[in-house]
């Protein structure tokens, strides 16, 4: 696909960003980590499309690695605020520390930050899918009304779609399947459509984020524990 067209598709992130700006003040503050991720994603898409496209592959890879790390931390924090990790007291801290240690080992000791290192990428994507499915199941079980206006449900559906696709791509790359093959080209070209669809789903989810107070008490409690 033409790089310009890819960049235009990537700007579908504007839909959840606009929804996030509109809802930010009155939305339940427990959704803040996800909103921050959406805002950072817009900045990163503009950075990549307007500034990094013509720079070296090393710089683009470094930016991609940093973004993935930020994305992982914010999403793990988001599920923590949603109460998905509350069953075990120190589970959030253990997962965070182990994953960061794994990232440092894989990208700075075992290999290079400029290389494709799949273990961290596949692992955190898998954890996000599991947490999202767990949240969806809990939401369906606990919801007494239609889910068509449940922001949490829509956001997790978007996360499942995006990260299942991400796992498939990373697995193909980890198996060293050549990127120039017809199959890999098709898989990579699908990315722009998967990204666009999930951004639209995120926009709907953000629009239906509950008003302040629904999860705020838990958010404040967990925030104090972390700080």
Image (tube, rainbow, N blue to C red):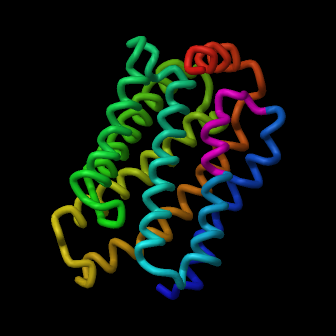
Residue drawn at point x = 51 percent, y = 62 percent: 195
Compared with 186, 82 (above or below) is above
Compared with 117, 78 (above or below) is above
Q: Magenta stretch mostly in which secondary structure?
A: helix
Camera-side residue of 215 and 68: 68
Camera-side residue of 153 and 187: 187
Camera-side residue of 201 and 144: 201
The picture quadrant where one finds residue 6 is: bottom right
Q: Is residue 34 magenta?
A: yes
- Residue 17, given in percent of the width and then of the height, sits at 71, 54
Compared with 200, 104 (above or below) is above
- Residue 209, given in percent of the width and then of the height, sits at 70, 35
Quarter of the image that includes the C terminus: top right
| Span highlighted in magenta in the image | 27-38
- Residue 65, given in percent of the width and then of the height, sits at 43, 58
User: In the current view of this chain or complex, which residue is farthest to the front?
Assistant: 109
């Amino acid at each position: 696909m033409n790089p310009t067209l890819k960049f235009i598709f990537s700007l579908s992130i504007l839909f959840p960003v606009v929804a996030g700006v509109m809802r930010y003040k009155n939305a339940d503050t427990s959704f803040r980590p996800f909103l921050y991720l959406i805002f950072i994603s817009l900045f990163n898409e503009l950075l990549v499309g307007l500034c990094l496209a013509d720079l070296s592959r090393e710089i683009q890879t470094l930016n991609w690695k940093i973004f993935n790390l930020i994305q992982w931390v914010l999403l793990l924090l988001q599920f923590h605020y949603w109460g998905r990790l509350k069953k075990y007291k120190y589970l959030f801290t253990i997962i965070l520390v182990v994953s960061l240690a794994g990232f440092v080992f894989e990208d700075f000791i075992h290999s290079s930050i400029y290389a494709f290192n799949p273990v961290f990428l596949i692992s955190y994507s898998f954890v996000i899918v599991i947490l999202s499915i767990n949240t969806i199941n809990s939401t369906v079980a606990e919801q007494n009304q239609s889910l068509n206006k449940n922001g949490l449900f829509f956001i997790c559906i978007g996360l499942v779609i995006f990260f299942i696709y991400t796992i498939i791509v990373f697995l193909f790359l980890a198996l060293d399947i050549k990127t120039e093959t017809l199959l890999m080209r098709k898989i990579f070209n699908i990315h722009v459509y998967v990204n666009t669809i999930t951004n639209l789903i995120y926009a709907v989810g953000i629009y239906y984020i509950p008003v302040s107070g629904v999860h705020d008490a838990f958010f404040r409690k967990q925030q104090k524990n972390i700080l």
